[in-house]
Image: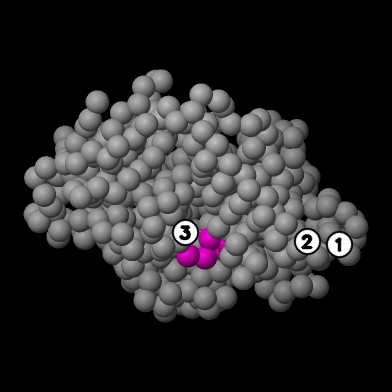
Protein backbone atom coordinates (compact mmCIF):
# COMPACT_ATOMS: atom_id res chain seq x y z
CA UNK A 1 0.00 0.00 0.00
CA UNK A 2 1.28 3.47 -0.93
CA UNK A 3 0.77 6.80 0.85
CA UNK A 4 1.74 10.15 -0.67
CA UNK A 5 2.63 13.37 1.19
CA UNK A 6 4.25 16.67 0.33
CA UNK A 7 6.55 16.39 3.34
CA UNK A 8 7.51 13.44 5.52
CA UNK A 9 9.15 14.20 8.87
CA UNK A 10 10.94 11.29 10.53
CA UNK A 11 10.98 11.98 14.26
CA UNK A 12 8.57 13.43 16.79
CA UNK A 13 10.88 15.32 19.13
CA UNK A 14 11.24 19.10 19.29
CA UNK A 15 12.88 19.38 15.84
CA UNK A 16 10.25 17.29 14.05
CA UNK A 17 7.27 18.88 15.77
CA UNK A 18 8.49 22.46 15.34
CA UNK A 19 9.23 21.85 11.65
CA UNK A 20 5.63 20.72 11.16
CA UNK A 21 4.30 23.79 12.97
CA UNK A 22 6.28 26.10 10.70
CA UNK A 23 5.40 24.42 7.38
CA UNK A 24 2.67 26.05 5.24
CA UNK A 25 -0.83 24.81 6.03
CA UNK A 26 -1.47 23.91 2.39
CA UNK A 27 1.20 21.20 2.47
CA UNK A 28 0.20 17.64 3.38
CA UNK A 29 2.60 16.55 6.14
CA UNK A 30 3.29 13.20 7.80
CA UNK A 31 5.21 12.85 11.07
CA UNK A 32 6.57 9.36 11.70
CA UNK A 33 7.23 8.27 15.29
CA UNK A 34 9.43 5.22 15.69
CA UNK A 35 7.59 4.24 18.87
CA UNK A 36 4.96 6.15 20.85
CA UNK A 37 5.20 9.92 20.47
CA UNK A 38 6.47 10.54 24.00
CA UNK A 39 9.53 8.32 23.56
CA UNK A 40 12.20 10.70 22.32
CA UNK A 41 15.35 12.36 23.62
CA UNK A 42 13.65 15.75 23.69
CA UNK A 43 11.39 14.50 26.46
CA UNK A 44 14.44 13.73 28.59
CA UNK A 45 16.06 17.18 28.38
CA UNK A 46 16.22 18.47 31.95
CA UNK A 47 18.32 21.61 32.11
CA UNK A 48 16.59 24.04 29.79
CA UNK A 49 16.97 26.09 26.65
CA UNK A 50 19.71 28.68 26.31
CA UNK A 51 19.06 32.02 24.66
CA UNK A 52 19.36 35.77 24.99
CA UNK A 53 15.79 36.98 25.40
CA UNK A 54 14.72 40.18 27.12
CA UNK A 55 17.90 40.36 29.22
CA UNK A 56 19.43 43.66 30.45
CA UNK A 57 22.87 42.14 31.13
CA UNK A 58 23.36 39.38 28.52
CA UNK A 59 23.86 39.70 24.76
CA UNK A 60 24.27 37.45 21.72
CA UNK A 61 28.02 38.10 21.54
CA UNK A 62 28.43 36.63 25.03
CA UNK A 63 26.32 33.60 24.06
CA UNK A 64 28.30 33.15 20.85
CA UNK A 65 31.62 33.38 22.68
CA UNK A 66 30.58 30.81 25.30
CA UNK A 67 29.40 28.47 22.52
CA UNK A 68 32.69 28.80 20.64
CA UNK A 69 34.83 28.24 23.74
CA UNK A 70 32.89 25.12 24.73
CA UNK A 71 33.17 23.80 21.17
CA UNK A 72 36.93 24.18 21.09
CA UNK A 73 36.54 26.82 18.36
CA UNK A 74 35.74 24.03 15.91
CA UNK A 75 32.26 25.49 15.47
CA UNK A 76 30.80 26.85 12.23
CA UNK A 77 30.87 30.59 12.96
CA UNK A 78 27.96 31.43 10.63
CA UNK A 79 25.78 28.71 12.17
CA UNK A 80 26.59 29.93 15.68
CA UNK A 81 25.62 33.48 14.71
CA UNK A 82 22.28 32.22 13.38
CA UNK A 83 21.70 30.23 16.55
CA UNK A 84 22.30 33.03 19.02
CA UNK A 85 20.72 35.84 16.99
CA UNK A 86 17.50 33.94 16.25
CA UNK A 87 17.09 32.45 19.74
CA UNK A 88 14.76 35.19 20.95
CA UNK A 89 12.46 34.67 17.96
CA UNK A 90 11.90 31.00 18.71
CA UNK A 91 11.83 31.26 22.50
CA UNK A 92 9.15 33.92 22.09
CA UNK A 93 7.26 31.69 19.66
CA UNK A 94 7.10 28.66 21.93
CA UNK A 95 6.00 30.86 24.82
CA UNK A 96 3.13 31.98 22.55
CA UNK A 97 2.35 28.31 21.94
CA UNK A 98 1.91 27.78 25.68
CA UNK A 99 5.32 26.67 26.93
CA UNK A 100 5.70 27.73 30.56
CA UNK A 101 9.09 28.63 31.98
CA UNK A 102 9.77 29.23 35.67
CA UNK A 103 9.47 32.81 36.88
CA UNK A 104 10.85 34.90 39.71
CA UNK A 105 8.53 36.40 42.35
CA UNK A 106 8.43 39.67 40.38
CA UNK A 107 7.11 37.88 37.29
CA UNK A 108 10.34 37.96 35.28
CA UNK A 109 11.71 34.72 33.85
CA UNK A 110 14.12 32.83 36.07
CA UNK A 111 17.27 31.95 34.19
CA UNK A 112 19.76 29.51 35.58
CA UNK A 113 23.46 28.89 34.99
CA UNK A 114 25.14 25.80 33.58
CA UNK A 115 28.69 24.76 32.81
CA UNK A 116 30.41 26.89 30.17
CA UNK A 117 27.92 29.78 30.38
CA UNK A 118 29.16 33.15 31.58
CA UNK A 119 25.64 34.48 32.16
CA UNK A 120 22.34 33.21 33.55
CA UNK A 121 20.54 32.54 30.25
CA UNK A 122 18.95 29.10 30.69
CA UNK A 123 15.15 29.18 30.57
CA UNK A 124 13.69 26.16 32.32
CA UNK A 125 10.53 24.46 33.52
CA UNK A 126 11.80 23.13 36.86
CA UNK A 127 14.04 20.22 35.76
CA UNK A 128 11.82 18.84 32.98
CA UNK A 129 12.07 21.51 30.30
CA UNK A 130 12.25 19.10 27.37
CA UNK A 131 9.03 17.42 28.39
CA UNK A 132 7.24 20.78 28.79
CA UNK A 133 8.31 21.99 25.34
CA UNK A 134 7.61 18.68 23.60
CA UNK A 135 4.15 18.32 25.12
CA UNK A 136 3.11 21.86 24.21
CA UNK A 137 4.42 21.50 20.65
CA UNK A 138 2.62 18.17 20.30
CA UNK A 139 -0.65 19.74 21.42
CA UNK A 140 -0.21 22.40 18.74
CA UNK A 141 0.59 19.83 16.05
CA UNK A 142 -2.48 17.76 16.92
CA UNK A 143 -4.58 20.81 16.06
CA UNK A 144 -3.10 21.16 12.57
CA UNK A 145 -5.44 19.76 9.92
CA UNK A 146 -2.67 19.28 7.38
CA UNK A 147 -0.52 17.08 9.66
CA UNK A 148 -0.90 13.32 10.21
CA UNK A 149 0.98 11.58 13.04
CA UNK A 150 1.94 7.94 12.58
CA UNK A 151 3.10 6.23 15.78
CA UNK A 152 4.95 2.92 16.19
CA UNK A 153 6.20 3.24 12.63
CA UNK A 154 9.67 1.75 12.16
CA UNK A 155 11.50 3.08 9.12
CA UNK A 156 13.17 0.09 7.47
CA UNK A 157 14.57 1.74 4.39
CA UNK A 158 14.66 5.06 2.59
CA UNK A 159 15.36 5.60 -1.10
CA UNK A 160 15.68 8.58 -3.38
CA UNK A 161 13.28 8.72 -6.34
CA UNK A 162 12.78 11.01 -9.34
CA UNK A 163 10.04 12.86 -7.42
CA UNK A 164 11.53 12.89 -3.93
CA UNK A 165 11.83 10.00 -1.49
CA UNK A 166 10.21 6.69 -0.63
CA UNK A 167 10.20 5.58 2.99
CA UNK A 168 9.39 1.96 3.81
CA UNK A 169 7.75 1.43 7.16
CA UNK A 170 6.99 -1.58 9.34
CA UNK A 171 3.90 -1.06 11.47
CA UNK A 172 1.86 -3.72 13.25
CA UNK A 173 3.61 -6.44 11.26
CA UNK A 174 2.81 -4.87 7.89
CA UNK A 175 5.11 -3.08 5.44
CA UNK A 176 4.00 0.02 3.55
CA UNK A 177 5.55 2.64 1.27
CA UNK A 178 5.27 6.35 2.05
CA UNK A 179 6.30 8.78 -0.65
CA UNK A 180 7.10 12.49 -0.46
CA UNK A 181 8.60 15.39 -2.35
CA UNK A 182 10.51 16.67 0.69
CA UNK A 183 11.86 14.71 3.65
CA UNK A 184 13.09 15.94 7.03
CA UNK A 185 15.19 13.59 9.13
CA UNK A 186 14.78 14.48 12.81
CA UNK A 187 15.59 11.04 14.18
CA UNK A 188 17.69 12.05 17.18
CA UNK A 189 20.93 10.64 18.48
CA UNK A 190 23.05 7.49 18.63
CA UNK A 191 23.13 6.66 22.33
CA UNK A 192 22.22 3.00 21.93
CA UNK A 193 25.50 2.48 20.10
CA UNK A 194 27.03 2.50 23.62
CA UNK A 195 26.63 0.18 26.58
CA UNK A 196 25.52 3.08 28.78
CA UNK A 197 23.71 6.22 27.67
CA UNK A 198 21.28 8.85 28.86
CA UNK A 199 19.35 8.42 25.59
CA UNK A 200 15.98 6.77 25.08
CA UNK A 201 15.58 3.39 23.38
CA UNK A 202 14.94 4.90 19.94
CA UNK A 203 18.38 6.53 19.68
CA UNK A 204 20.00 4.09 17.28
CA UNK A 205 21.13 6.47 14.52
CA UNK A 206 18.58 5.34 11.94
CA UNK A 207 18.30 8.66 10.12
CA UNK A 208 22.08 8.98 9.89
CA UNK A 209 22.29 5.47 8.49
CA UNK A 210 19.62 6.06 5.84
CA UNK A 211 21.25 9.34 4.79
CA UNK A 212 24.67 7.64 4.58
CA UNK A 213 23.29 4.79 2.51
CA UNK A 214 21.75 7.26 0.06
CA UNK A 215 25.04 9.11 -0.31
CA UNK A 216 24.51 12.18 1.88
CA UNK A 217 27.58 13.67 3.53
CA UNK A 218 28.12 12.70 7.16
CA UNK A 219 30.46 14.92 9.14
CA UNK A 220 32.24 14.70 12.51
CA UNK A 221 30.31 11.67 13.72
CA UNK A 222 33.15 10.99 16.14
CA UNK A 223 32.25 14.19 18.03
CA UNK A 224 30.42 12.36 20.79
CA UNK A 225 29.63 14.09 24.08
CA UNK A 226 29.82 12.22 27.38
CA UNK A 227 27.84 13.82 30.17
CA UNK A 228 29.93 13.90 33.36
CA UNK A 229 27.07 13.41 35.84
CA UNK A 230 24.94 10.42 34.94
CA UNK A 231 23.63 8.52 37.94
CA UNK A 232 26.02 5.61 38.40
CA UNK A 233 23.71 2.62 38.35
CA UNK A 234 25.34 0.36 35.80
CA UNK A 235 22.61 -2.28 36.03
CA UNK A 236 20.61 -0.61 33.22
CA UNK A 237 21.65 0.58 29.75
CA UNK A 238 19.71 3.84 30.08
CA UNK A 239 21.36 5.97 32.75
CA UNK A 240 19.39 8.65 34.55
CA UNK A 241 20.88 12.05 33.88
CA UNK A 242 21.56 14.47 36.73
CA UNK A 243 21.29 17.83 35.01
CA UNK A 244 24.19 20.19 34.70
CA UNK A 245 21.88 22.74 36.29
CA UNK A 246 22.51 21.00 39.63
CA UNK A 247 26.14 22.08 39.38
CA UNK A 248 24.88 25.44 38.16
CA UNK A 249 23.12 25.79 41.51
CA UNK A 250 26.29 24.97 43.41
CA UNK A 251 26.75 21.18 43.58
CA UNK A 252 30.27 19.84 44.17
CA UNK A 253 32.01 16.95 42.43
CA UNK A 254 33.75 14.54 44.81
CA UNK A 255 36.20 11.69 44.22
CA UNK A 256 36.28 8.31 45.98
CA UNK A 257 37.67 10.01 49.10
CA UNK A 258 34.68 12.40 49.11
CA UNK A 259 37.08 15.23 48.28
CA UNK A 260 36.62 17.97 45.67
CA UNK A 261 39.13 17.63 42.83
CA UNK A 262 38.15 19.89 39.92
CA UNK A 263 40.59 22.60 41.10
CA UNK A 264 43.37 20.25 39.98
CA UNK A 265 42.11 20.28 36.39
CA UNK A 266 40.38 23.57 35.53
CA UNK A 267 39.94 27.04 37.06
CA UNK A 268 36.22 26.92 36.25
CA UNK A 269 35.85 24.02 38.70
CA UNK A 270 32.47 22.24 38.49
CA UNK A 271 31.23 24.78 35.92
CA UNK A 272 33.77 23.89 33.25
CA UNK A 273 32.29 22.59 29.95
CA UNK A 274 31.14 18.99 29.84
CA UNK A 275 34.12 17.54 27.97
CA UNK A 276 36.54 19.16 30.42
CA UNK A 277 34.67 17.77 33.43
CA UNK A 278 34.34 14.29 31.91
CA UNK A 279 38.06 14.24 31.08
CA UNK A 280 38.88 15.34 34.62
CA UNK A 281 36.79 12.53 36.11
CA UNK A 282 38.53 9.90 33.97
CA UNK A 283 41.99 11.28 34.81
CA UNK A 284 41.09 11.44 38.50
CA UNK A 285 39.78 7.86 38.34
CA UNK A 286 43.15 6.73 37.03
CA UNK A 287 44.95 8.74 39.68
CA UNK A 288 42.85 7.30 42.51
CA UNK A 289 42.43 3.86 40.89
CA UNK A 290 38.68 4.10 41.47
CA UNK A 291 35.52 4.79 39.47
CA UNK A 292 33.65 6.01 42.55
CA UNK A 293 32.58 9.64 42.10
CA UNK A 294 29.82 11.70 43.67
CA UNK A 295 27.75 14.83 43.17
CA UNK A 296 26.90 16.71 46.37
CA UNK A 297 24.39 19.52 46.78
CA UNK A 298 23.21 18.41 50.23
CA UNK A 299 24.65 21.53 51.89
CA UNK A 300 21.94 23.63 50.17
CA UNK A 301 18.49 24.21 51.66
CA UNK A 302 16.46 21.01 51.24
CA UNK A 303 13.23 22.79 50.25
CA UNK A 304 15.07 24.74 47.57
CA UNK A 305 16.47 21.50 46.12
CA UNK A 306 13.07 19.78 46.10
CA UNK A 307 11.40 22.74 44.41
CA UNK A 308 14.18 23.41 41.90
CA UNK A 309 14.81 19.76 40.97
CA UNK A 310 11.59 17.84 41.69
CA UNK A 311 12.10 15.18 39.00
CA UNK A 312 15.73 14.54 39.89
CA UNK A 313 14.92 14.46 43.61
CA UNK A 314 12.07 11.96 43.20
CA UNK A 315 13.88 9.71 40.73
CA UNK A 316 16.96 9.48 42.93
CA UNK A 317 14.77 8.83 45.97
CA UNK A 318 13.36 5.79 44.16
CA UNK A 319 16.96 4.59 43.73
CA UNK A 320 17.60 4.94 47.47
CA UNK A 321 19.40 8.30 47.48
CA UNK A 322 18.19 11.53 49.05
CA UNK A 323 19.98 14.34 47.22
CA UNK A 324 19.08 16.76 50.02
CA UNK A 325 21.00 14.68 52.59
CA UNK A 326 23.85 12.84 50.88
CA UNK A 327 26.22 12.72 47.88
CA UNK A 328 24.93 10.78 44.86
CA UNK A 329 27.12 8.37 42.83
CA UNK A 330 27.81 9.61 39.28
CA UNK A 331 30.04 8.73 36.33
CA UNK A 332 30.28 9.93 32.72
CA UNK A 333 28.26 8.19 30.02
CA UNK A 334 27.27 8.83 26.42
CA UNK A 335 24.88 11.74 26.13
CA UNK A 336 24.87 13.68 22.87
CA UNK A 337 26.14 13.75 19.29
CA UNK A 338 27.63 16.94 17.84
CA UNK A 339 28.30 15.49 14.38
CA UNK A 340 25.79 13.93 12.02
CA UNK A 341 24.20 14.49 8.62
CA UNK A 342 25.96 17.55 7.27
CA UNK A 343 23.59 20.45 6.55
CA UNK A 344 23.76 24.09 5.52
CA UNK A 345 22.23 27.09 7.29
CA UNK A 346 18.76 26.06 6.07
CA UNK A 347 19.21 22.44 7.18
CA UNK A 348 19.63 21.17 3.61
CA UNK A 349 21.69 18.00 3.31
CA UNK A 350 23.90 17.34 0.29
CA UNK A 351 20.97 15.51 -1.36
CA UNK A 352 18.16 17.48 -3.04
CA UNK A 353 15.02 18.08 -0.97
CA UNK A 354 16.41 16.10 1.98
CA UNK A 355 16.77 17.99 5.27
CA UNK A 356 18.10 17.05 8.69
CA UNK A 357 17.36 18.78 12.01
CA UNK A 358 18.13 18.28 15.66
CA UNK A 359 20.67 15.84 17.03
CA UNK A 360 20.98 13.72 13.88
CA UNK A 361 22.21 16.77 11.94
CA UNK A 362 25.57 18.50 11.82
CA UNK A 363 24.97 22.24 11.64
CA UNK A 364 28.38 22.94 13.12
CA UNK A 365 27.02 25.08 15.97
CA UNK A 366 28.40 22.81 18.69
CA UNK A 367 31.95 22.34 17.45
CA UNK A 368 33.59 19.42 19.22
CA UNK A 369 31.58 19.85 22.44
CA UNK A 370 28.04 21.12 22.92
CA UNK A 371 27.47 23.99 25.32
CA UNK A 372 24.78 23.03 27.82
CA UNK A 373 21.18 23.76 26.77
CA UNK A 374 22.05 24.73 23.20
CA UNK A 375 20.49 21.52 21.86
CA UNK A 376 16.82 22.43 22.25
CA UNK A 377 17.61 25.84 20.80
CA UNK A 378 19.35 24.31 17.78
CA UNK A 379 16.38 22.01 17.21
CA UNK A 380 13.99 24.98 17.13
CA UNK A 381 16.05 27.41 15.07
CA UNK A 382 17.16 25.03 12.34
CA UNK A 383 13.90 23.08 11.99
CA UNK A 384 12.12 26.41 11.47
CA UNK A 385 14.67 27.32 8.83
CA UNK A 386 14.15 23.94 7.13
CA UNK A 387 10.40 24.54 7.06
CA UNK A 388 10.93 27.99 5.58
CA UNK A 389 13.21 26.63 2.86
CA UNK A 390 10.70 23.93 1.94
CA UNK A 391 7.97 26.56 1.77
CA UNK A 392 10.03 28.50 -0.79
CA UNK A 393 10.47 25.41 -2.98
CA UNK A 394 7.12 23.66 -2.61
CA UNK A 395 5.43 25.38 -5.55
CA UNK A 396 7.96 23.86 -7.97
CA UNK A 397 7.54 20.28 -6.70
CA UNK A 398 6.12 17.72 -9.15
CA UNK A 399 2.48 16.71 -8.91
CA UNK A 400 3.15 12.98 -9.14
CA UNK A 401 4.88 10.54 -6.75
CA UNK A 402 7.23 7.71 -7.67
CA UNK A 403 7.54 4.66 -5.42
CA UNK A 404 10.92 2.95 -5.15
CA UNK A 405 11.20 -0.83 -5.07
CA UNK A 406 11.46 -2.56 -1.73
CA UNK A 407 11.47 -6.20 -0.66
CA UNK A 408 11.70 -6.98 3.07
CA UNK A 409 11.88 -10.70 2.38
CA UNK A 410 15.49 -10.69 1.28
CA UNK A 411 16.14 -13.68 3.51
CA UNK A 412 14.46 -16.01 5.95
CA UNK A 413 16.98 -16.07 8.78
CA UNK A 414 17.13 -13.67 11.74
CA UNK A 415 20.38 -11.84 12.42
CA UNK A 416 22.92 -13.53 14.74
CA UNK A 417 22.19 -13.04 18.42
CA UNK A 418 24.40 -10.61 20.28
CA UNK A 419 25.18 -8.39 17.28
CA UNK A 420 24.19 -5.12 18.97
CA UNK A 421 25.79 -6.16 22.27
CA UNK A 422 29.14 -6.75 20.57
CA UNK A 423 29.09 -3.36 18.85
CA UNK A 424 28.26 -1.59 22.11
CA UNK A 425 31.19 -3.24 23.86
CA UNK A 426 33.50 -2.20 21.02
CA UNK A 427 32.37 1.43 21.23
CA UNK A 428 32.56 1.58 25.02
CA UNK A 429 36.14 0.37 24.87
CA UNK A 430 37.36 2.31 21.80
CA UNK A 431 35.64 5.68 21.97
CA UNK A 432 34.65 6.60 25.51
CA UNK A 433 35.73 10.06 26.83
CA UNK A 434 39.42 9.52 26.01
CA UNK A 435 39.51 7.54 22.72
CA UNK A 436 41.78 4.52 22.34
CA UNK A 437 43.15 4.49 18.78
CA UNK A 438 44.40 0.91 18.95
CA UNK A 439 41.02 -0.34 20.16
CA UNK A 440 39.36 1.85 17.51
CA UNK A 441 41.36 0.22 14.73
CA UNK A 442 40.52 -3.26 15.99
CA UNK A 443 36.88 -2.27 16.50
CA UNK A 444 36.61 -0.76 13.03
CA UNK A 445 37.74 -3.98 11.38
CA UNK A 446 35.16 -5.96 13.34
CA UNK A 447 32.40 -3.40 12.72
CA UNK A 448 33.15 -3.47 9.01
CA UNK A 449 32.95 -7.28 9.03
CA UNK A 450 29.62 -7.27 10.88
CA UNK A 451 28.17 -4.57 8.64
CA UNK A 452 29.15 -6.37 5.45
CA UNK A 453 27.59 -9.56 6.80
CA UNK A 454 24.32 -7.79 7.62
CA UNK A 455 24.13 -6.19 4.17
CA UNK A 456 24.94 -9.32 2.17
CA UNK A 457 23.94 -12.11 4.54
CA UNK A 458 20.35 -12.51 3.37
CA UNK A 459 18.69 -11.81 6.72
CA UNK A 460 15.03 -11.06 7.21
CA UNK A 461 14.37 -7.30 7.48
CA UNK A 462 12.62 -7.09 10.83
CA UNK A 463 13.14 -4.60 13.67
CA UNK A 464 16.21 -6.45 15.00
CA UNK A 465 17.84 -6.26 11.58
CA UNK A 466 17.07 -2.56 11.04
CA UNK A 467 18.31 -1.47 14.47
CA UNK A 468 21.44 -3.62 14.32
CA UNK A 469 22.34 -2.27 10.88
CA UNK A 470 21.90 1.29 12.10
CA UNK A 471 24.06 0.72 15.17
CA UNK A 472 26.85 -1.00 13.30
CA UNK A 473 26.83 1.60 10.52
CA UNK A 474 27.18 4.43 13.03
CA UNK A 475 30.00 2.60 14.81
CA UNK A 476 31.69 1.92 11.46
CA UNK A 477 31.64 5.62 10.51
CA UNK A 478 32.78 6.83 13.95
CA UNK A 479 35.68 4.42 14.25
CA UNK A 480 36.80 5.13 10.71
CA UNK A 481 36.96 8.84 11.60
CA UNK A 482 38.89 8.13 14.81
CA UNK A 483 41.60 6.30 12.87
CA UNK A 484 42.16 9.19 10.43
In which quadrant of the rendered image does the C terminus lie? bottom right
Which stretch appears magenta?
A: 219-223
User: Does residue 462 appear to the left or right of 277 in the view shown?
Assistant: left
The reply to whether callout 1 and callout 2 are in contact (CB within 8 Å) is yes
- Residue 452: x, y in percent? 56, 46
- Residue 369: x, y in percent? 56, 66
Q: Is residue 416 above or below residue 162?
A: above
Image quadrant where residue 171 sits:
top left
Which residue matches tag 1? 286
Can the viewer see residue 337 in this picture? yes
Q: Residues within 10 Å of mark 3 (few under 14, many from 20)?
A: many
Label 1 and label 2: CA atoms lie apart by: 6 Å
Task: Write the residue at 74% across / 39% down.
Answer: 233
Can the viewer see residue 194 in this picture? no
As rendered, which of 262 and 421 lies closer to the eye?
421
Q: How many marks?
A: 3
Amino acid sequence: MEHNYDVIIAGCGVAGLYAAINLPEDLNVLIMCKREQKLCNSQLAQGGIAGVYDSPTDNINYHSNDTMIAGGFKNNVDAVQILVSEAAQDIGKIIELGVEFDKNPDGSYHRTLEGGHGHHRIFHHADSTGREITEKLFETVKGLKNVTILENALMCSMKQTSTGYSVFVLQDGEYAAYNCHFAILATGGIGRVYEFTTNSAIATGDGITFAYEMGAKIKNLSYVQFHPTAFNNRSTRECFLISEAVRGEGAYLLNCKKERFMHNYDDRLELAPRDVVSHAIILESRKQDSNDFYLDISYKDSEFIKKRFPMIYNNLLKQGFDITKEPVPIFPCQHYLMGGIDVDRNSRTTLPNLYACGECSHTGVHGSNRLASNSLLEALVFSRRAAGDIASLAASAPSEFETASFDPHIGADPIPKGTRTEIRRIMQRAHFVLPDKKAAAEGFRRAEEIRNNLISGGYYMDADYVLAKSIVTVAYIILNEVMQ
